[in-house]
């Protein structure tokens, strides 16, 4: 037959979720939630309050983080991770129950920290988070008893030292009395030279740990013997014959006196049935071996390696501790000076790091002349040869995959302004002018001619109609300045005329040669120009038919012909335009073909005058010749 939770043979009672033997799950309430507040400041932040009497306590981070959970009582006593000291995982007593502190240390693990306890708690406890990075969320859950809860049943034949309502207490004491005895033992420990506990005022503060109240070891002879008919005789009595073995070899243990039935006169031991069992003294616990145990180094677990590959560092906590009254207490480090302190840091290497590899040579420069760029392929490769993300390699050691390249100076070209709008003469023949300057071209990829000696004209004829004059050197009024700004010229008409009564007759200049001829041109300067747009002539079209493009370079120049950025962008001449939109027509001469794909460069470079190029690029050179001869229909 089975035994129920009430310890009766044949009983079918079981413990419900509220921890009540024979309960119906109505005597308690499950409280749960998730703490997701966004925290800004570093340090301790309260997460949830665990009320007195709570059971089935579960406090768990939603996932792994650099934050830590902490626990302390409402009275201010730190239980786990208090006073900025991080405890290693393990079991810690607090609030009348035992908490299991878990902190997964595996690198691959994503689980967060947790506190677990069966309860019930005998005081209010507060859960805190030591905030160091964004809060991943903390799930909390506990069970509290309701008003209609059935108290846990304890069998009437419960033996001393057995669990009472989930707590281990000494014989004959309630849980409250057991706690009072713990406090008494602590005071006795301090008076008897027990190791001191580091408080929050110490230079290196750690929280005090309070495990379960010590369950004393009872002598085997206290187990009730089989009932026998008592032989009550005045010749026999109970006598103490020694004590049980001390429960610990140091740090304050406990022992019990051993009582035997002996003959009053001879003191010989006789069966216990010869003595009155009701008169047998109750063994009381006695302290023993109260001297402190030697201090020892308590070594924590190694932290994760600081690097995922290559040589890194890992740390662990090493504390000096002493055991007294069945409690492990953190003490000053000098108490462990007789022992060599274990290392708190160590090197580690999880795997060999990936490295940078240059997979290709440099490409050709992006421009045919001037300053451009070139590239190459750089990859992060693992120690087994696989291409991985760049983050796997040291970014500080990454080789350059792009750099500048200088292909030398580009060809020079003439840069021209537009023709001026004003004619130098108000009537008759005059000129219009423009500015011409030779500069280096850095834009066009098409070949442009060098400046050479073929300087474009700076003046062009203009005529505003016939003028009338008189007989003599006749000087007209000075024309407007040829340009609106900068250095220009003014023109005026100087002719030899014969003055009639109402008219002037123009004569040949030699007729007035005996007279000093007035100047017909002079320089003028109205105002500084500032900046003005200059441009080169159009290049050859990139295609002779079916739509190509031609380019020119446009620059903004100041009065001293240096580059400027003060020109009006809306007045900037176009730098590229389409050309030769006509369709291509079949070649008439089947033997006249281009042998090379870049014959348009030969045409642009005006190399068709040479027999070799005229033959190698027959079609292209023929088209140019036909176009110049007036055959625009040729391709």
Image: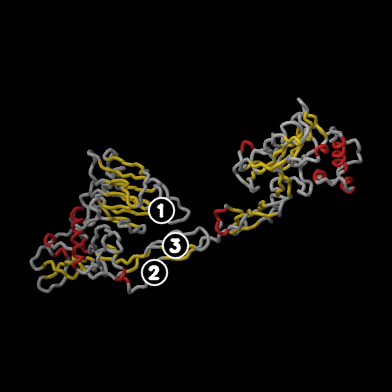
Disc on the earlier residue, 1 or 3: 1
Viewer-proximal residue among 50 and 226 = 50
Image quarter of residue 16: top left
Quickly name the residue at label 2: 342
Disc on the earlier residue, 1 or 2: 1
Tag 3: Cα neighbours inside 10 Å, few (<14), some, or many (≥20)? some
Structure colour scheme: secondary structure
Disc on the earlier residue, 2 or 3: 3
Quickly name the residue at label 3: 314
Does the residue at mark 1 contact the one at mark 2 (Cβ under 8 Å)?
no
Could you tell me residue 10's position as x and y percent?
29, 45
Could you tell me residue 48's position as x and y percent?
31, 46
Quickly name the residue at label 1: 66
Does the residue at mark 1 contact the one at mark 3 (Cβ under 8 Å)?
no
Image quarter of residue 435: top right
Tag 1: Cα neighbours inside 10 Å, few (<14), some, or many (≥20)? few
| Measured Cα–Cα span from mark 1 to mark 2 | 25 Å
Foreground mark, 2 or 3?
Answer: 3
Image quarter of residue 408: bottom right
Whether residue 579 is visible here, answered yes or no, is: no
| Measured Cα–Cα span from mark 2 to mark 3 | 14 Å
Viewer-proximal residue among 380 and 581 = 581
């Amino acid at each position: 037959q089975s035994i129920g939770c009430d310890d009766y043979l044949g009983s079918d009672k079981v413990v419900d979720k509220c921890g009540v033997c024979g309960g119906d799950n109505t005597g308690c309430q499950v409280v749960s939630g998730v703490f997701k507040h966004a925290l800004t400041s570093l340090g301790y932040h309260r997460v949830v309050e665990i009320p007195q009497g709570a059971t089935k306590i579960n406090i768990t981070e939603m996932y792994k983080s650099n934050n830590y959970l902490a626990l302390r009582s409402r009275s201010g006593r730190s239980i786990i991770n208090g006073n900025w000291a991080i405890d290693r995982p393990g079991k810690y007593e607090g609030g009348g129950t035992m908490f299991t502190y878990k902190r997964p240390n595996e690198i691959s693990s994503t689980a967060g920290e947790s506190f677990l306890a069966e309860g019930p708690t005998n005081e209010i406890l507060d859960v805190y988070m030591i905030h160091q990075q964004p809060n991943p969320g903390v799930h909390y859950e506990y069970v509290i008893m309701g008003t209609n809860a059935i108290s846990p049943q304890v069998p009437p034949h419960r033996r001393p030292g057995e669990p009472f309502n989930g707590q281990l207490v000494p014989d004959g004491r309630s849980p409250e009395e057991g706690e009072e005895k713990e406090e008494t033992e602590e005071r006795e420990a301090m008076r008897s030279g027990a190791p001191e506990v580091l408080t929050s005022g110490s230079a290196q503060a750690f929280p005090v740990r309070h495990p379960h109240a010590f369950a004393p070891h009872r002598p085997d002879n206290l187990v009730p013997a089989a009932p026998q008919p008592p032989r009550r005789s005045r010749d026999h009595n109970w006598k103490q014959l020694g004590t049980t073995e001390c429960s610990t070899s140091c740090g304050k243990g406990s022992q019990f006196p051993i009582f035997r039935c002996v003959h009053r006169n001879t003191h010989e031991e006789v069966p216990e049935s010869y003595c009155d069992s009701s008169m047998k003294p109750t063994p009381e616990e006695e302290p023993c071996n109260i001297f402190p145990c030697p201090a020892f180094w308590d070594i924590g677990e190694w932290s994760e390696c600081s690097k995922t590959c290559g040589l890194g560092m890992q740390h662990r906590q090493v504390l000096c501790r002493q055991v007294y009254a069945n409690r492990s207490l953190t003490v000053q480090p000098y108490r462990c000076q007789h022992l060599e302190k274990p290392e708190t840091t160590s090197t580690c290497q999880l795997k060999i790091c990936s490295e940078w590899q240059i997979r290709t040579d440099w490409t050709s420069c992006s421009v045919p002349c001037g300053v451009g760029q070139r590239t190459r392929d750089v990859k992060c490769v693992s120690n087994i040869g696989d291409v991985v993300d760049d983050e796997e390699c040291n970014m500080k050691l990454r080789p350059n995959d792009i750099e500048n390249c200088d292909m030398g100076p580009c060809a020079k070209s003439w840069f021209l302004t537009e023709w001026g709008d004003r004619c130098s003469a108000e009537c008759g023949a005059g000129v219009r002018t423009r500015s011409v300057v030779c500069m280096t071209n850095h834009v066009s990829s098409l070949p442009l001619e060098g400046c050479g000696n073929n300087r474009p004209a700076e003046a062009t004829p203009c005529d505003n109609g016939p003028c009338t004059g008189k007989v003599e050197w006749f000087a007209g009024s000075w024309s407007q300045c040829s340009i609106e700004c900068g250095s220009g010229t003014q023109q005026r008409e100087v002719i030899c005329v014969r003055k009639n009564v109402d008219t002037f007759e123009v004569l040949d200049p030699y007729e007035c040669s005996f007279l000093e001829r007035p100047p017909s041109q002079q320089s003028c300067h109205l105002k500084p120009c500032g900046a003005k747009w200059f441009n080169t002539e159009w290049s050859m079209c990139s295609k002779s038919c079916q739509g190509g493009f031609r380019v020119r370079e446009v620059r903004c120049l100041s009065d001293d012909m240096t580059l400027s950025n003060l020109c009006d962008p809306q007045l900037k001449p176009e730098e590229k335009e389409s050309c030769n939109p006509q369709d291509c027509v079949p070649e008439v001469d089947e033997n006249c073909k281009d042998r090379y794909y870049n014959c348009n460069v030969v045409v642009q470079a005006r190399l068709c005058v040479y027999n070799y190029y005229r033959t190698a690029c027959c079609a292209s050179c023929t088209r140019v010749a036909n176009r110049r001869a007036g055959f625009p229909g040729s391709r």
